[in-house]
Amino acid sequence: MGGKCPHRSVKKRRYSHKTARRTKFLYKGDDMVYDELQKPDEERKLLPVDEDLPGMGQYYCRHCDRYFSNVAVRDEHFKTKRHKKRVKQMMGPAPHTQLDAEIAAGMGMPDNGPKLMSM
């Protein structure tokens, strides 16, 4: 006796509403965010008003590439473990780029070693 409930196999796994919400807006890759953070403050442009984004696009986290509905929510995000981990990641070495991936796969420029003397 015992075991799983027979009705469990019938129910489908439900996706979290948070997962669907996170994928609603397109996010930049790690290398693009890293390059954006390396720019001086003078080159960073002000955020334009966009009605399609949460909070009219005015409350933005540069490290995580996320928009928030108001200042309080953004400030709460700054205290989270996910944000702190992301800041630490972006302060470290540069993330891998597409060129790095192509070279690792053998599709980049060949490295034939040093030239030998011809006879």
Image (cartoon, rainbow, N blue to C red):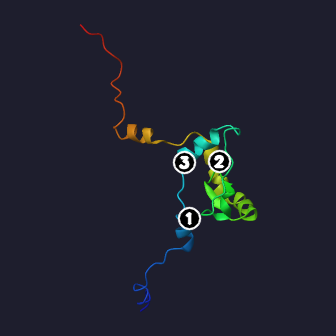
Q: Quadrant of the N terminus?
A: bottom left
SS at mark 3 in the image: helix
For the residues carrying marks 2 and 3, which lies nearer the camera in this image?
3
In-image side of 101 versus 48 (left or right): left
How busy is the neighbourhood of tag 3: few (under 14 within 10 Å), some, or many (20 plus)? some
Q: Residue at the far left: name it.
A: 119
Q: Residue 69, how many percent across, how many down?
A: 68, 65
What kind of residue is marked 3?
Answer: Asp
Which mark, by number, is residue 22? 1
Q: Which residue is mark 2?
A: 88
When the figure is inspected, residue 69 is found, relative to residue 1, above or below; the finding is: above
When the figure is inspected, residue 94 is found, relative to residue 9, above or below; the finding is: above
Mark 1 or 3 closer to N-term? 1
What kind of residue is marked 1?
Answer: Arg
When the figure is inspected, residue 74 is found, relative to residue 31, above or below; the finding is: below
Query: How far apart in space, not on screen, are marks 1 and 2 (Cα)?
Result: 21 Å
Name the residue located 48 percent from the left edge and 41 percent from the top edge. Answer: 97
Mark 2 or 3 closer to N-term? 3
